[in-house]
Amino acid sequence: MIKRRLIDELKARQADLYALCSRLVQIPSENPPGDTTKLAAFIRDYLVSRGIEPEWHEPMAGRPNLVARVGSGGPRVVLAGHLDEFPAGQGWTRPPFSGAVEDGRIWGRGAGDMKAGLAVALTIASLIRGMGVSLRGTLTLAFASDEETGGAWGTQWLLANVPAVHGEACLIGESSGTWSAGIGEKGVLWLRLRAAGISGHAAYRQGTSAIASLHAALRALDRLHGRRGKPNASVAQVMSRQRQAAERWWGPGTGRLAGRLAVSVGTLAGGGQVNLIPESAMAEVDLRVPPGLTTARIEKEARRLIRQAARGSVEVEVFNHCEPYVTPPDSRLVSLVRDNARQENNRQVLPVVRLGYTDGRFFRRAGIPTVVYGPAVHNMGGPDESIETADLLEVALVHAGAVLDMLVPGGRR
């Protein structure tokens, strides 16, 4: 049986999977600055050495995207991932790019976000090729740069310009935790607010404070916080079921966030010196939009509230937006991920709507059923980032099982 043989081979070679993840961690790809050339070159050479010829697409200098295919025709399954990672930052107790495999973990920046997912995809494609598995369709690897800074030159560009990255299903090994399968994500709306005033001497209260106008606008905008969406029944049921688990795995207070709008001021600047009334001020606001609401509706309401509160002295600019796309929870890909987690790992996986976003939003926007399933990440974005090797193997077994179920005739036997 083809599937069983490949799964057994993957288990037998788990040390190779860990070593590959470790090697990927050892190649910095921090964004900013965003240059992923060295990592992309390593992956290209890795694939070529295993008989897989990748395509190199570089629409922005220093930020290449790689696309590779095994098999041909349909159906088409995409294993997607991103090459860039957060900057290492300070405070590490071991070198941030050590890739050390110690204490049952793989340590280093990007270990979970998301070099683990890259290692899984590369290992599965290599095993399929190396074992001569005959596919009844195409397995596509789509590795993009620019995910951490919006994806304009990464996955968005690939979907717009490379037909091969479109398929009937997309599986992403982004950090999630093996208890959850991300079938959707809250939408995002980023607003830049600019306030204009009239400068004057603070002692004489001559002038109009831009900061005061901006403060009024931000207070008004905060009234949107907590607004509920009205998703369809199946999505509402998913979010209801995930509440208790979210409190346990994501932290206190997160249980209801999937269904409520969240407002957060991310940057704030204004004024020139302490004894002058400020003539300008700026703020950037992050709004996470739950299923059942649209960014257009929230933008319209935000503009109305700001206009009323600041009396026309604050301009509003949208500099990032994406809708809250959700893959139907009864789709085949969701079922396969859950089935394989149960069969291979004795794991009950819960479909969830994620609070943060991934490149999965672009695949869903293109009409491609997408699931995010990856290891839990300890200290993601902070010092001493790590993943557990047991999680990495669990994820690899689930991805491999789902791919074979879709692409090998009789693969589920």
Image (tube, grey):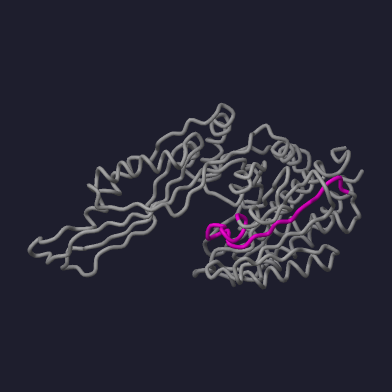
Which image quadrant is residue 326 in? top right
Segment tinted magenta in the rendering: 135-156
Q: Residue at x 66, y 47 (%)?
A: 373
In the rendered image, the quadrant that contains the N terminus is: top right
Relative image position of residue 212 (x, y in whole percent): 21, 54
Residue 24 counted in the magenta span: no
Residue at 84% from the left image edge and 38% from the top image edge: 412
Corner quadrant of residue 43 = bottom right
Residue 286 at what x, y percent from top left? Answer: 42, 50
Position of 276 relative to 359 (above/below): below
Q: Looking at the picture, tell me which residue is in the foreground, 202 or 377.
A: 202
Does 153 appear above or below 235? below
Task: Give the residue at x 54% y 34%.
Answer: 239
Image quarter in which the C terminus is found: top right
The vertical placement of 398 against 388, above or below, is above
Q: Is residue 2 left or right of residue 258?
A: right
Q: Count the labels in the image.
A: 0
> Residue 245 location in percent, x, y?
56, 38
